[in-house]
Amino acid sequence: MKFYRALWMITVVLTVFLPLEASAIGIEGALGIWNMKQQGDMSYNGPDLNLEEDLQLGYDTAVFGRIKADMPLLIPNIYFMFTREKNEGTGTKAEDFVFGDRTFSKNAPFSSKLELNTYDLALYYGIPFLKTATLGKLNVDAGLNIKLVDLDVVLTQNNVSESKEYTTPVPMVFLAVQFTPVKRLAIEAELRAISLGSADHYYDLLGRLKYMVIGPAFLCAGYRHEDVKMDRKSLRLNRRAGGPFFEIGVAF
C-alpha cells in the first residue's frame, strides 16, 4: 500500500507541479475541514456491521486540500484534491459475529477504526467559448478523474484483533460548474462519479459558495456528499457521508 501511495504522490508532483511553474495561467489552492455524518454498513467475510449502531462511527471531521491550474491552449487543466478521514468508535453486538478470520464475542465492547484517505487527480477542459459568451459569468468543465482510495479498517476486542486495508484506483468522470453573478462572489459545483450497475459505485458531489475577501484570498462554505459502494479483497463498504465544509484559500 505504501508503495502505491508513494507512486501516486510522485505522479502527482510530476504531473501537477512541474508544468505549473512554466505554463499555468491561473492557480487556485485551498485547505478546509468537512464535518460529516456517515451512514451505511461494511463486512469482511462476515455479516454486515452498521457504521452507526454497531461500530459507533457516525460523526467525523475530515481534512482536505486542493490545488488546480488553468493551462493554456490545448493543454488540459489540472485539479488535485486530497481528503483524510479517520474515525474511531466503541460498540457492542447482541450476538457473536465474524470479521475477517476472527470471531468477536457478543455483549462485549469492541473498538473500531475506519481510516479512508482519497487522492483525486482530474484532467479537464472548459466548454469552448461559454465563458466568453456569458461575459465571464458561467463556465462548465468536463474531463476524467482518477481517485486513489486508501482504506484501512481495524476491529479490536480484548486480545482479538483483525484488520484489513487496500489501495485501489477508481476512474471517474469529472464535471464542474462555476457561476459568478458579481465580481467577488461565485457559486460552484463539482461531481466525480462512476457507476458499475449494482456492483460498485462512487459518487462524490460538492457545492460551494466562494467569496473573495481581499486580494487573492477567499473563503468558502459548502456541502459535500459521498455515496460509496465497493467490494475489494472481501472487504465490502456501503457508505453514505455528507455534511458542511469550510475552506480558506488563494487564487492567482
Image (cartoon, helix red, strand yellow):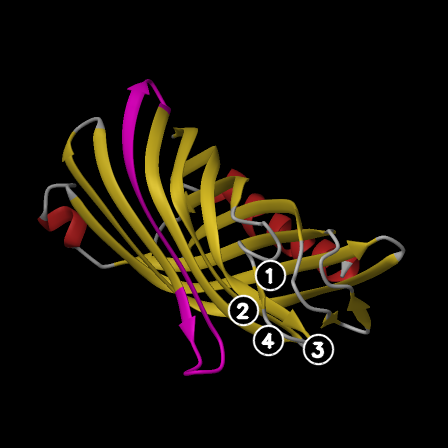
Q: For numbered disc 4, what is the local secondary structure?
A: strand
Q: Which residue does the image show at 59% across and 45% down from the upper left?
A: 84
Q: Indicate the quadrant where residue 27 lies.
A: top left
* Mark sitting earlier along the chain (4/3): 3
Q: Which mark is residue 231?
A: 4
Amino acid type of disc 3? Asn
Mark 3–mark 2 Cα distance, whole angstroms, equals: 23 Å
Q: For numbered disc 1, what is the local secondary structure?
A: strand
Residue holding disc 2 = 170
Q: Nearer the viewer, residue 23 or 133?
A: 133
Q: Is residue 26 left or right of residue 84?
A: left
Location of residue 139 in the rendering, given as x and y in whole percent from the top left corner: 21, 50
* Mark sitting earlier along the chain (1/2): 1
Per the rendered image, the range of residues in magenta is 193-217
Q: Nearer the viewer, residue 75 or 65?
A: 65
Residue holding disc 1 = 149
Mark 1–mark 3 Cα distance, whole angstroms, equals: 20 Å
Location of residue 245 in the rendering, given as x and y in whole percent from the top left corner: 40, 37
Q: Indicate the quadrant where residue 127 lies.
A: bottom left
Residue holding disc 3 = 45
